[in-house]
Amino acid sequence: MSHTFYIAASYVVAAIITLCLIGWVWFDGRARQKELAELEASGIRRRSAKPVATTETGGAA
């Protein structure tokens, strides 16, 4: 076994770990977006969202 083999193996392992982490974050982000969409569809809004404008009728002017 040469020194080059260990260097190449370490790069391969680092690349696999990096790709796994990227995939995990990507899939988790999709799951969170789906959860947010379900919550918003059920009427729950985020605090950072702008409030829905309601028209007031019958108010004194």
Image (tube, rainbow, N blue to C red):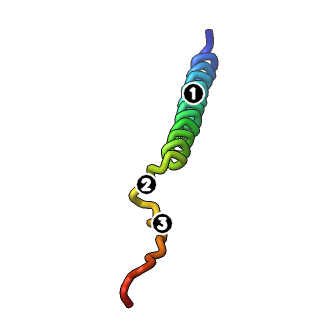
Q: Is residue 35 above or below residue 8?
A: below
Q: On residue 10, which mark appears?
A: none
Does 47 sit left or right of 35 as displayed?
Answer: left
Q: What residue sits right under mark 2 in the picture? A: 46
User: SS for tag 1?
Assistant: helix
Residue at x 53%, y 34% (from the top left corner):
28
- The Cα–Cα distance between marks 3 and 2, rounded to whole angstroms, is 12 Å
Residue at x 54%, y 47% (from the top left corner):
41
Does 39 sit left or right of 19 as displayed?
Answer: left
Residue at x 57%, y 27% (from the top left corner):
20
Query: Of 9 and 43, which appears nearest the observer?
Result: 43
Q: Quadrant of residue 6?
A: top right
Q: Is residue 16 above or below residue 22?
A: above
Q: Nearer the viewer, mark 2 or mark 1?
A: 2
Q: What residue sits right under mark 3 in the picture? A: 52
Q: What amino acid is found at the position of numbered circle 1 in the picture?
A: Cys
Graded by Cα atoms within 10 Å as few (under 14), some (14 to 19) or many (20 or more), the crowding at tag 3 reads few
Does 60 sit left or right of 1 as displayed?
Answer: left
- The Cα–Cα distance between marks 2 and 1, rounded to whole angstroms, is 30 Å
The first of marks 2 and 1 along the sequence is 1
Q: Is residue 55 above or below residue 47?
A: below
The first of marks 3 and 2 along the sequence is 2
Q: What residue sits right under mark 1 in the picture? A: 20
User: SS for tag 3?
Assistant: loop
Q: Nearer the viewer, mark 3 or mark 2?
A: 3
Residue, far left: 60
Q: Is residue 1 above or below residue 35?
A: above
State yes or no: discs 2 and 1 in contact (Cβ < 8 Å): no
Residue, far bottom: 61
User: SS for tag 2?
Assistant: loop
Q: What is the quadrant of the C terminus in the image? A: bottom left
